[in-house]
Amino acid sequence: MLVIIILILLFPLAGFVVLGVGFRKISPRITAFIGPGTILVSFLLSVVVLISFYHFAILPSCHLFEWITIGPLRIPFEFLLDPLSCLMLLVVTGVGFVIHLYSVGYMKGDPGFNRFFAYMNLFIFSMLMLVLGGNYLVMFIGWEGVGLCSYLLIGFWYKNREYSNAAKKAFIMNRIGDLGFLLGMFLLFTTFGSLSFDRVFAGAQHLQPGDPAVVAITLLLFVGAVGKSAQIPLHTWLPDAMAGPTPVSALIHAATMVTAGVYMVARSNALYMLSPVSMAVVGLTGLVTALFAASVAIFQYDIKKVLAWSTISQLGYMFAGLGAGAFTGAMFHLTTHAFFKALLFLGAGSVIHALGGQQDIRNMGGLRNKLPKTWWTFLAGTLAIAGIPPLSGFFSKDEILHHLWEQSPALWILAVAGAMMTAFYMFRLLYLVFFRDFRGTEQQRNHLHESPRIMTIPLIILALLATVGGILNIPEIFCGRSNLGKFLAPVFPNIQHPGSSIQDPAASIPHPASHITEWALISATLAACLLMIFLAWRRYVQKGRGILPDGAAQPFAARLLSQRYFVDEFYETVIVRPLLSLSRMLHDGVEVRFIDRFVEGVGRAVTGAGNAVRYIQAGNVGFYMFMMIAGIILALVLNIFV
Amino acid sequence: MSALSTIPISYYLIFCSLLFCIGVVGVLIKRNALVILMSVELMINSINLLLAAFSVYMNDPAGQIFVFFIMVVAAAEVAVGLAIVVLIYRTTHSIDINVLNKLKW
């Protein structure tokens, strides 16, 4: 099993090394094989792992070598392969492979083609390290690695200053979260004496719920998740990260990197279950983020920004689910979200590609007939995200909503409000892009073409997954067997399993709802979402409204939302400007006056000494004579006195 | 000889020291190679004078014999030195010691 893990990690890493070293010399045709090929191998190996889960016993913790040994601190380099990491493996490599295929078509002709695939392979390697890590530190390597690759890939077209700034912003906000993660790790070590998952979770069994150390640890780790998964208040980097190529947005900022926070909390469920405070914080942050981001998405005009805010919102749902104890639900939603969000991003990329780089939906429209495959797959993705049965999004979102109802009906109502907004803005996007007449230039209209097969086949694959992905975890009331729940059951030992009838008194669900209540909830949610879809139809298709140019007068509420609640501006004034002026002050006051003088002074002193000593060898006869006479006089004087 | 003894030795000492210092300063400051050679001659001549003066005051003729030797050696040295300067001038057309600075490693 260790061998398979190493191979799964090795192929993307080898891809990165090969492409990174030879990126000037390897022809793009070979890169088109190496790039996706390595991920395909990892995916096939992950499938092998999945199959072996059902047939053989798995050695959970695979120890590679003793990594850090300092006194009592002993951190081995180990991997953990359990159902949760297996699920993440499949999602990462599967969706990753599909996106790599798409990128071969999307990035064709770009001068940085090889560099792109090198970075993408490095990213997959880091993400795999993250999900396979057997202790918090190995996970942290992957955590940092994906942050790095996010920076490299967002700023891929580095010659554009704005894109590089977006990349810097993403990386810095990630690092702020990482500070919390690090502090959490330190506290973990002092509390449990080890960072390995098996030891920490075993030690957690002996602690009381509400133990202050555990509360602190979980909150700190969650700070890391907030940064990585773009929750409020560290969410502003994600919309700006749309500066990167669309496959990057699909892979990193929809399907994999941003879900690392969710994975981490799910992995640490033993710790979170001990601390209701942290669960509440997680859940509330998630819910607030979900609503906040959904409200902003309604007013965005850039196709990718709508999807970015949508991602933030859906991640909020995942965290809300985690906070409510729906660990399986959150992981299920993570999986289905990976499918449909990647699909939506790739579809958006297809549209952008067809329009030659246009991203403003005010200049789109009527693309249904011109881009049929893109239209149908995008429709599938939109239906999935809006939660329309029988697509996958319906089942995953519903599971989270169910758990929220059981925590408190008020939470359910808020979540449904978010779902309504989700349906509204997603269908707004669909209508404005694909319906009515084309609003772009004549040149673009003639240039419109469906994307090549290498781009549409991934779309179709993802559309199929988004449509039928729900079968992973169909709950009881639909006569399903909650396969995913059962698969992940060993990872979440304290949770009541949806498919079983064991009532655990310590379970997180206080009173599981009856079937009638469940049907009522589902129907209410569905009706509300269908209503929103209809309202969006009325406004954007029938009446053709909702297209405002930049700078048009808007009522205050609309302006608040379309300017993203002015959070960016707030951060700019409160944090960025003071830091920059402090920086400038230190530069002018300390750097130039003291440090520069000192350093340059050393140089000048050396140069001056050199200039003086140079006379010995300068061939200057006058100096030689002078030295000779000076030496004679010195000898005489010394002779007299010594 | 006795008439010479009426001039105190210190006068000769100071005079020759001054001449010697003028010679040294000339060697250090002047850029013209010929002038440097002349200053060296000045130094040698001041020493000659001092030697002669001491030989009178000590009533020892050895000083004056030594002066003859020094004069011969000085003449030979000047001949060789001037020959070198002439040759240098033929090749580099300059006798400025700031220009003639190739005497390194």
Image (spheres, coloured by chain):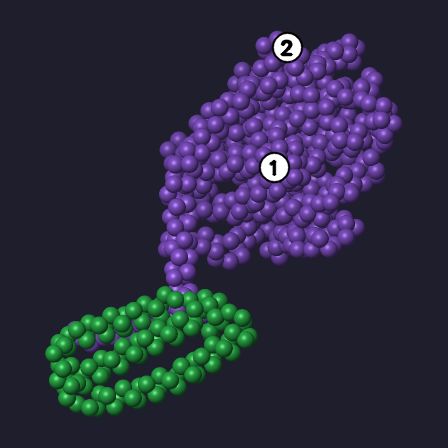
Residue at mark 2: chain: A
In which quadrant of the rendered image does the C terminus of chain A lie? Answer: bottom left
The residue type indicated by label 2 comes to Gln
Q: Looking at the image, is mark 1 or mark 2 earlier in the sequence?
A: 1
The quadrant in which residue B93 appears is: bottom right
* Mark 1: amino acid: Ser
Q: Are marks 1 and 2 in contact (CB under 8 Å)?
A: no
The residue located at (70%, 35%) in the rendering is: A246
Say if B19 sits above or below A419 in the image. Answer: below
Say left or right for A35 vs B102: right
For residue A7, what is the image quadrant?
bottom right
In the rendering, what colour is chain B?
A: green
Q: Which residue is more in the foreground, A205 or A175?
A: A175
Q: Secondary structure at mark 2?
A: loop
Label number found at residue A164: 1
Residue A404 rendering spot, x and y as whole percentages: 56, 22
Residues packed near mark 2 inside 10 Å, few (<14), some (14 to 19) or many (20 plus): few
Q: How far apart in space, not on screen, are marks 1 and 2 (Cα)? A: 31 Å
Which mark, by number, is residue A554? 2
**Residue B14 coordinates in the image, percent (x, y):** 19, 72
Which is nearer the eye, A177 or A128?
A: A177
Residue A463 shows up from this direction: no
Chain bearing tag 1 is: A
